[in-house]
Amino acid sequence: MADNKDLSNPKGSSDVNKSKEAFRELRAAERRGDLRGRLAVVTGASSGIGLQFCRTLAGMGAALLMISNRREELERCAREVARDFNVKTVAMYCDLTQPDAAEAVTRFLDSRGMVADYLINNAGIFSFLPVADTAEKKIDCFIDLHVRAVTALSREFARRFRERGCGRILNMSSMSCWTPMPGLAMYAATKAYIRVFTRSLHYELLDSNVTATAACPGGIATDLFGLPPKLMRLALRIGAVQSPEKFTRRAVDRMLRGKKQYVNGLLNRLAIPAVACAPTPVRLLVKHKMLDKNITR
């Protein structure tokens, strides 16, 4: 079990020499896949990809601050991850759509003497509804969660990482950031923001040995898209979607290597220009086959 002293900021860490030493130690541990004594902050940690990120990082020895707005599920998942991987986990209930959410997270860390090495902004929502049929509250949620919360948390942790001279941020974008399709307007637009923001942040931070990675997955086998179990199993067999375990392993690997972007799977990478060039009739076909038949999420 990692204890609190393992997560505390060493005295004088803002000193240049100690910052360089911290950087070298962290990089050496990352190359070994040994994250013992390190702390990862993961949002959306009570289910799906967020929970799998926690399990992947815990398997490498990292302690975790797990954040979610689902209190009971979060506390149960935190206990299970701690038990399964013998690491320290701390559950934090937080509604990231609130204006002071980023401040609440950093206040929570500071009050416990915990210093993060990694931030994974994973929390998100999804919808197939056309914009005109989407409730104003849901539109606000897309913007608050995918734009404001990601930006505010990235800023707070980037400042802390930069001061220490090491740290990594991974922000979850999506393949849909290249996909202006009917029914995906809010999701795709806000995920496009995350990608562009994270790429720019990556360049801003490079001189300080801090990296930001935008993960842009295609379909992942979670309940986000609401696929029936049989259809999900078929999609996995034919490679249309990827398991959360495989995706998070590779995304964490890219983050630890300081890559600026990760798109999972060769087919997804090849599909980016094809989908981006899709003619209007194809986009309307999607609308007629899905939205006009009330296939919503």
Image (cartoon, rainbow, N blue to C red):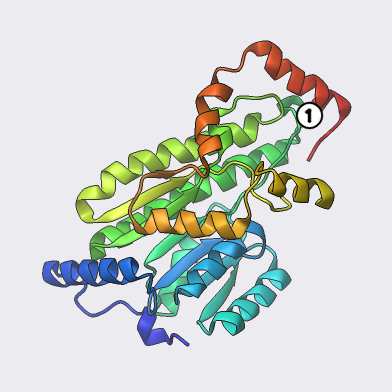
**Disc 1 residue type?**
Asp
User: Of 297 and 69, which appears nearest the observer?
Assistant: 297
Instruction: Sort mark 1 into few (<14), some (14-19) or many (20+) by Cα contacts within 10 Å.
Output: few
Which residue shows up at 66% across the image and 58% down it? 48
User: Of 231 and 226, which appears nearest the observer?
Assistant: 231
Q: Which residue is mark 1?
A: 133
Q: Is residue 7 visible?
A: yes
Q: Find residue 271 and report its horizontal and vertical position in percent.
A: 55, 29
Q: Which residue is outermost to the right?
A: 293
Q: Find residue 259 and report its horizontal and vertical position in percent.
A: 35, 48
Q: Which residue is outermost to the left?
A: 17
**Viewed as shown, does residue 57 lie left or right of 286?**
left
Q: Which residue is outermost to the front?
A: 238
| Residue 92 higher or lower than 100, as above or below | below
SS at mark 1 in the image: helix
Tag count: 1
Q: Quadrant of the C terminus?
A: top right
Q: Find residue 18 and report its horizontal and vertical position in percent.
A: 16, 72
**Viewed as shown, does residue 51 lie left or right of 30?**
right
| Residue 165 higher or lower than 267, as above or below | below
